[in-house]
Structures are given as C-alpha cells and as structure tokens.
Amino acid sequence: MEGQVVGRVFRLFRRRAGPPQDNSGEALKEPERAQEHSLPNFAGGQHFFEYLLVVSLKKKRSQDDYEPIITYQFPKRENLLRGQQEEEERLLKAIPLFCFPDGNEWASLTEYPRETFSFVLTNVDGSRKIGYCRRLLPAGPGPRLPKVYCIISCIGCFGLFSKILDEVEKRHQISMAVIYPFMQGLREAAFPAPGKTVTLKSFIPDSGTEFISLTRPLDSHLEHVDFSSLLHCLSFEQILQIFASAVLERKIIFLAEGLSTLSQCIHAAAALLYPFSWAHTYIPVVPESLLATVCCPTPFMVGVQMRFQQEVMDSPMEEVLLVNLCEGTFLMSVGDEKDILPPKLQDGILDSLGQGINELKTAEQINEHVSGPFVQFFVKTVGHYASYIKREANGQGHFQERSFCKAVTSKTNRRFVKKFVKTQLFSLFIQEAEKSKNPPAGYFQQKILEYEEQKKQKKPREKTVK
C-alpha cells in the first residue's frame, strides 16, 4: 500500500508561478508574475520550496467524520502538460493524508497544542520531497478544528523551515492575503550555501517593514536534524542498538504520542547513518490508512502514533525492533542488537557520548556531540574504501570488495564489515564513489584524513617506546 502513495514518481516540472488560490473562497490577488530560475547544485542557489499549502478538515457528507483537504495552495501551476498535471495531482492528493495521519475522527476544540513535524514522500528513483508541517488551532472564538500549514521542499533543513513556518503562522493570523508577498519573496530568493544567510524584506500591516534573516548551518550534514528528542526519550545504549539495527537494514518502528517527537526521533535515527543514506521505506509519521506498512517484508523505518499501538502489535511482523519513545523501552526486538557491532567500537561510542554531555547548551553542540562518535565508527571500519577503488583509463572505478575486507586487521571489525558491504546502504555509497574520480570533499572525508594523520603520528611514538 505504501508503494501506491509514497512510492510514486512525483516529478514536478517548474512553470511560471500563477496566483495563489484559497479554496475556502477568500479572493487573493497576485501583485505580479514571478520568473522561475534554473536549479543549480544543492550547495546553494536552489529554490527554498515547491509549494505552500494549507490543509483543513472538511466534514464528509452524511457522515460524522472528517477528511483533510487542501484549502490554499501557492503557487498554482499553469500550462502543465497532461502527464505533468497527473503527477502534480497525485502529489497533492497524498499530502493531506500525511498532514492529518491520525485518522478522520475529529471534534471542534477550544484548545490544541501546536505541533511542528515533517513527512517524506519518496520517489521511485530514491529522491525525496519533504513536507514541513505546523498543525495548530486557528485564531477565532468558540470551538474550531485544527489546520496545517505545509511547505513542500526537496531540501532537508528542519530548523530553517521551522522559522519560515513561524512567519507564515504570524501572517495567517492577520489575513491569508499577507502570506502571499512573503512566500513570493522567499520563492524568488536563492537557498543559501552552508553558513550563509539570506535576508527577506516583508511588509506586515500595522507593523511596518520587517527584515527576516534565514541562516543555513555551516555543517550542512546535520541541518535537518535535532538529536535532543532522541536523547530525551532513550538511553545511549538503546540509541546504539537502534543504530546497529539500521546499519543492517532491519525493520524499525517508533511509537510516540506527539507528531513532533515521532518525526524528530526518526530523522535523528536516520541521520546517525551519515555518510550513508537509508534507501528503503521511510515514513516519519505513518497515516492510519497506511498502517499495513508494518507488515512489509522489506526493510523500513517508520513512526506510528501511540493510539495505533495495539493495531501494530497485532500485525504479522517478523524481526522488527519496536521502540516505545514514551516509555523508553523496546516492545519487540530480534534479540541480537547488542552483538551486531564490534564490542570495542561499541564501548568507544558509548564513552564518547557520555563525556561532557551535560555541558552542552546549544542544539548545534548536541548534534555534533551525538553524531561525531557514529561518524568515527564508519571512519574506523570503512574509511579506507577509496584506496580499494581501481580505476580504468576513462576514470570509471571498480570496488575491490575482497581486498577491502581483508585490509581490516581486527577480526571482529572484519566480521562486521563483511556483513555491512552487502547492504544497500554501502552499495549505493560505493556506486557514487566509483563514478567520482576523487573522494567527495565533505565532512566524512575530512574525518578520514584526520584519522589517517593521527595513525601516522601514533606509529613513530610506538617505535620510540619500543
């Protein structure tokens, strides 16, 4: 079932941006038509987003329950070819389902806690679109239903889009029409390179002109994640076991009450795999209608709301790690999670995580502290991969798997590496490395070079001691 909605190819062909449309009937005017720009590399310059949507609950005819529908869309695309229009329709049909994954039973409320969360739509080619959501109760008297502001983007940067959602929410309290100039300005701005800032000029009635600065983190490999929720819910030992299960591409289910907790924890778990990328089914918050995903025979990493716990537990599942984030427990496990990683390297990760954790203050410091030991784990186990890619005259590389594994001197490390090289995580990484004539310049390569330099310095000291 997941393949029907999440696994479709959502290729959006960019056209001139048409006027925004509010399906609830409020007339919105478009000041001017914007020119689209070509899309440079992800390093910077790309559009911030593809769509801003408002998803509201509408009562079904002759029924007591509700269905989520899109009531506002910017931009409204025009002049699409038939195939392009069909793909857009499939995308827009799927989005409301993920904005209200809880099901269709709702009642009007006077109080509702604001939730910020995200979901991921995976294309057949493996590329992903991210939905950044803010669900809240709109301003107004009396009982009312919550609605969702949703920004669809190909860019993973949760902190940045959370700030953008703050600005959208602030403007929506005034009028839907005030949102358009802000989002149009954002759409015309180029997404900044790592460490850079883009400043937007925006006018708000009764407040005047505001300047909004959006800064992208310098270390871009952690810009889409916040490890704080994962640390709050689980122990270091449990996080290590989740990491071990993910490394061998097993089935992992997270249970939690809140959408924010679910999406933040599953993004954090996937981020521990850097520089490798989870390429299997990945749904931070599974909608009720897609709960059959947990019966899938292939690897998955999904989040499920606690209200569906019994339905999940009653589903036919094999070799799954079921994590209760509310209680900080494993409800189901394979049983060998503590034995997957080499013992010495496991101890090293735990020691590094525990050192100075209470002295960290900012989210950036926490992210770096948590991610660092796991990156170092991959440096020590597979960081020598580039030396075992044999290249032809045309530059095409061929990975020498047997020699690569033999080069690992520790028997326990080698045993792990022999399993890891068979995963899709490693295969996709190596395929990219084979295409590139030089190792990619990035955080992982930097850590490999630092580790190799440390080993060089260590050898002369060992000779001196002898």
Image (spheres, grey):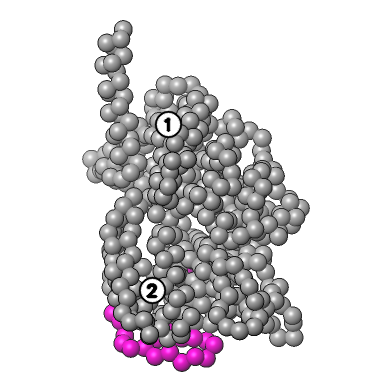
Q: Residues within 10 Å of mark 2 (few under 14, many from 20)?
A: few
Residue 262, how many percent across, how many down? 58, 56
Q: What amino acid is at disc 2?
A: Phe
Image disc number at residue 107: none
Q: Main secondary structure of the magenta part?
A: loop
Q: Nearer the viewer, mark 1 or mark 2?
A: 1
Residue at the spot x=43%, y=79% of the render?
171
Q: Please state which of residues 111 and 98 is positioned toward the viewer in this rendering.
A: 111
Residue at x 48% of width, y 80% of height? 173
Q: Which residue is mark 1?
A: 381
Q: Is residue 86 magenta?
A: no
Q: Quadrant of the C terminus?
A: top left
Image x and y of residue 274, in percent: 42, 45
Residue at the image position 33 percent from the left and 58 percent from the top = 216
Give the residue pinned by disc 2.
13
**Residue 213 in the image: x percent, y percent?**
31, 66
Q: Nearer the viewer, residue 24 or 159?
A: 159
**Residue 257 shows in the view:** yes
> Tag 2's secondary structure?
loop
User: Which residue does the image show at 57% across and 51% down from the upper left?
Assistant: 301
Q: Secondary structure at mark 1?
A: helix
Which of the 4 image quarters holds residue 458? top left
Magenta span includes 16: yes
Q: Which residues are magenta?
A: 10-36
